[in-house]
Amino acid sequence: MPRSTADDAGRRHDRRPRRIGTWPAVGVTVAVLGVANLALHRWTGAWGLVTAVVVSGLLLGVLRWAGGTLADAGLARGTLARGARWALVLIGLVGVVYLAGALLPATRGLFEDRRYDAMGGAEVLLRVFVLVPVGTVLVEEIAFRGVLYGLVYRVRGAVWATAVSSLLFGLWHVLPSLHLATAKPAVGSVVGQSAFGAVLGAVLFTAAAGVLFCELRRRSGSLLAPMGLHWAVNAFGYLVGYLLR
């Protein structure tokens, strides 16, 4: 007997990929980020870059699994030009602020960092143009202002998306900040040599920065805007810190 049209439609429906709910997708994203945080804290150089790219791809896959699109991640093609303009303006503003801070004696000490003592110019450039944009900015922006923000925004709106994304962004920086007070004298002068004080300060500061990054994402409609600011803050920090050794 010939198969009925209804049977064919049912079989086609059964072959469609099953979607995961939004909050389970958030849970999967957090689990992936927990493993990635440990891996990126341990692995540096090429392995760290590969990990960052793989994790970014996995997280975009989770978003797609939940029925999301590149637009939900702030990467819609139609928003890229606007996001790039925002990014260029923000990079210029950060450059001006860093230059003024480096030239003024009252703020020059904020850029002191003992981690630069053994760095050469080639390593600094590698960090500025490869490690920071790929190993830091790409994975963190896709994770927090892209996938997490996009998932929560779909069901709870901008306030919840910003709160969840920023809180987790702050917690993401616990491991990197364990030795911050020793490395940066300016931080040590505020919190002492206490690892707890440095970690708490880093979590609060980066969570607040996350709020700003989320707002840039919301206002520009593009992930490129927070990416530009994020890169500028980290990259110019390396450059100025190295030049002021």
Image (tube, rainbow, N blue to C red):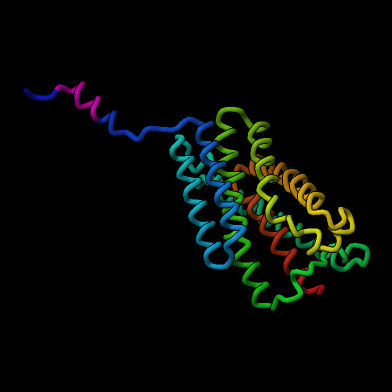
| 112 in relation to 205, above or below | below
- Choose between 194 and 244: the one closer to the eye: 194
Q: x%, y% of residue 105?
A: 92, 67
Question: What residue is at 60 percent from the left and 42 percent from the top?
Answer: 221
Question: What residue is at 37 percent from the left and 32 percent from the top?
Answer: 18
| 75 in relation to 186, above or below | above
Q: x%, y% of residue 226?
A: 65, 50
| Residue 170 on the magenta span | no
Q: How many marks?
A: 0
- Choose between 131 and 86: the one closer to the eye: 131
Question: Which of the 4 image quadrants contains residue 208?
Answer: top right
- Choose between 87 and 230: the one closer to the eye: 230
- Quadrant occupied by the C terminus: bottom right
Question: Which of the 4 image quadrants contains residue 13?
Answer: top left
- Quadrant occupied by the N terminus: top left
| 98 in relation to 143, above or below | below
Question: What residue is at 46 percent from the left and 35 percent from the top?
Answer: 66
Q: x%, y% of residue 163?
A: 68, 35
Horizontally, residue 151 falls left or right of residue 123, namely left
| 233 in relation to 201, above or below | below
Q: Give the main secondary structure, helix, strand or loop, of the magenta stretch.
A: helix
Horizontally, residue 153 falls left or right of residue 69, namely right
Question: Which of the 4 image quadrants contains residue 84?
Answer: bottom right
Question: What residue is at 87 percent from the left and 68 percent from the top?
Answer: 103
Q: x%, y% of residue 129?
A: 62, 67
Which region of the structure is painted magenta? 4-11
Direction left: furthest residue = 1
